[in-house]
Image (cartoon, helix red, strand yellow):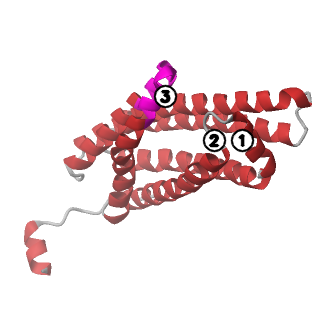
């Protein structure tokens, strides 16, 4: 049986590993290969660096696995305090993971085109690759809106818990609202792409600090019994 302390550590470690893999997979590889508003350069990069693109796809699969682990571990951690809300929170993360899986399938489709396995005429291959890339971004963005609602409920769970400082709940809610606002805007107002990217850069700190900071707390303090004041003085 997994203890509350163990579930906290599993969730925290999985979130930190996932964040590191995402920074490499999306922050480095994807942004190196995909050049906004430069279609020919992007297509050339994908064809010339197939091995790097394969590495990105592997990274996304690892992230997907971590999301499932985190959903389970956070449910185990919070279920004794509010089982229904914990279940809904976990389900939202699993739904997000399903959207991420659908988005990654678009990247696999691009790889099949590069390898000549898709049965697409060469003159249409580039256009189809760009279409799949756009579909990857839109599918993932929609999923991240759901992820934002997952963080929102996670923030409410943290605020309800007597063992968690309220500041973590506030940070998670701020991160949630940032995800929901940014990615709803990306889907609903694509004509304001440059302004949305500026806002995303500004909000990247609370978006990262909310979940990653909470992950560190889970590893260090999550599931540990609260130390009483007199015990603290005795141990000092």
Q: Position of residue 52 (x, y in %)?
A: 72, 54
Above-or-below relation of 120 to 232: above
Which residue is located at x 46 percent, y 58 percent? 16
Above-or-below relation of 123 to 198: above
Q: Residues within 10 Å of mark 2 (few under 14, many from 20)?
A: some
Magenta stretch, main secondary structure, is helix
Residue stretch rendered in magenta on the structure = 182-197
Which residue is located at x 46 percent, y 50 percent? 73
Q: Is residue 183 magenta?
A: yes
| Labelled pair 1, 2 in contact (Cβ < 8 Å) | yes
Earlier in the chain: of badge 1 and badge 2, it is 2
The residue identified by callout 3 is: 193
The residue closer to the viewer here, 103 or 193, is: 193
Which residue is located at x 30 percent, y 38 percent? 173
Tell me how far mark 3 sits from mark 2, CA to CA: 14 Å
Q: Quadrant of residue 122?
A: top right
The residue identified by callout 1 is: 41
Q: Position of residue 207 (x, y in %)?
A: 38, 44
The residue identified by callout 2 is: 35
Secondary structure under tag 2 reads loop
């Amino acid at each position: 049986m997994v203890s509350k302390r163990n579930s906290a550590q599993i969730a925290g470690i999985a979130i930190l590993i996932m964040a590191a893999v995402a920074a490499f997979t999306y922050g480095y590889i994807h942004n190196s290969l995909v050049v906004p508003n430069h279609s020919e350069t992007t297509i050339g990069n994908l064809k010339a660096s197939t091995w790097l693109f394969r590495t990105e796809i592997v990274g996304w699969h690892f992230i997907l696995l971590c999301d499932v682990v985190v959903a389970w571990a956070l449910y185990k951690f919070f279920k004794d305090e509010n089982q229904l809300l914990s279940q809904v929170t976990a389900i939202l993360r699993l739904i997000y993971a399903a959207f991420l899986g659908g988005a990654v399938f678009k990247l696999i489709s691009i790889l099949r085109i590069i390898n000549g396995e898709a049965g697409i005429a060469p003159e249409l291959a580039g256009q189809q690759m760009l279409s799949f890339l756009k579909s990857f971004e839109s599918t993932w963005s929609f999923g991240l809106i759901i992820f934002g609602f997952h963080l929102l409920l996670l923030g409410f769970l943290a605020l309800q818990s007597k063992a968690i400082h309220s500041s973590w709940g506030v940070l998670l809610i701020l991160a949630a609202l940032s995800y929901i606002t940014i990615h709803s805007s990306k889907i609903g107002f694509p004509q304001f792409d440059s302004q949305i990217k500026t806002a995303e850069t500004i909000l990247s700190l609370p978006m990262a600090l909310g979940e990653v900071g909470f992950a560190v707390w889970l590893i260090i303090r999550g599931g540990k019994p609260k130390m009483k004041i007199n015990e603290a003085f005795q141990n000092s």
